[in-house]
Image: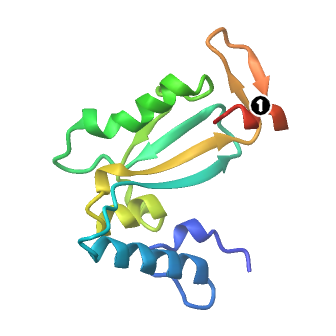
Amino acid sequence: MGYDLNRHWLNPDPWAHAPILHTRKLLLELAADPNVPLDFFIDLHAHSTCTNSFVFANNADGCNMDQEMLFPRLLGINDRTFSVQNTKFCKDPSKLGTGRRALGEFLTVAPHCYTLEVSFYCAVDSKSRILPYTEETYIELD
């Protein structure tokens, strides 16, 4: 079928995008339940052209930027391959179909909707050395 499922969170088709439809439905049900504290949404991806790992975030209106930066800063402290500098805050309309953007519109956790991207290939350390990812280095990303 060839669908990029991460572009169909706004209007998922029941047949073509069933995993997205049901995940979205469940998250909206949980968000509507006052007994369920839904505080955070993260979407995990591998990136084919960038190095290291980094985050896309929504840059929610009226939110304290320090609050939005907390998760990326914690990743930067705990993962030597995470790039706080490559973290991007945007509300690009062309990304509205992504989980991060769509759920940021629907959920009250909008300032805490992130996409974590990890390079397919490598990290670059503080001395500009290329560190190719291997099975062992991926395990070390915890």
Q: Residue at x 44, y 78 (%)?
A: 26
Q: Of residues 2 and 137, which is closer to you in this image?
A: 137
Q: Residue furthest left?
A: 62
* Residue 71 percent across, percent down from the top left: 41, 37
Judge from the rendering whether residue 43 lies leftward or rightward of residue 74; answer left or right.
Answer: right
Task: Report if residue 134 is visible in the image.
Answer: no
User: Is 64 rendered above or below residue 28?
Assistant: above
Where the C terminus falls, by quadrant? top right
Residue 48 in percent (x, y) is at 71, 45
Q: How many numbered marks have been drawn onto this rendered protein structure? A: 1
Left or right of residue 138: residue 61 = left
Q: Position of residue 114 (x, y in %)?
A: 44, 50
Q: Secondary structure at mark 1?
A: helix
Residue 33 showing in the rendered view: yes
> Which residue is located at x 30 percent, y 57 percent?
109
Above or below, 142 against 112 in this view is: above
Looking at this rendering, what residue extends furthest in the top direction?
Answer: 127
Q: How crowded is the residue under tag 1: few (<14 C-alpha within 10 Å), some, or many (20+)?
A: some
* Residue with the mark numbered 1: 137
Quarter placement of the N terminus: bottom right
Judge by depth and name the residue closer to the eye, 77 or 46: 77
Amino acid at dot 1: Thr
Query: Which residue is rendered at x = 83% and y = 38% of the image?
Result: 135
Q: Position of residue 5 (x, y in %)?
A: 60, 71
Residue sitting nearer the eye, 48 or 79: 79
Residue plotted at (41% across, 72% down): 27
Q: Is residue 128 above or below residue 120?
A: above
In this view, the residue in front, 5 or 70, is 70
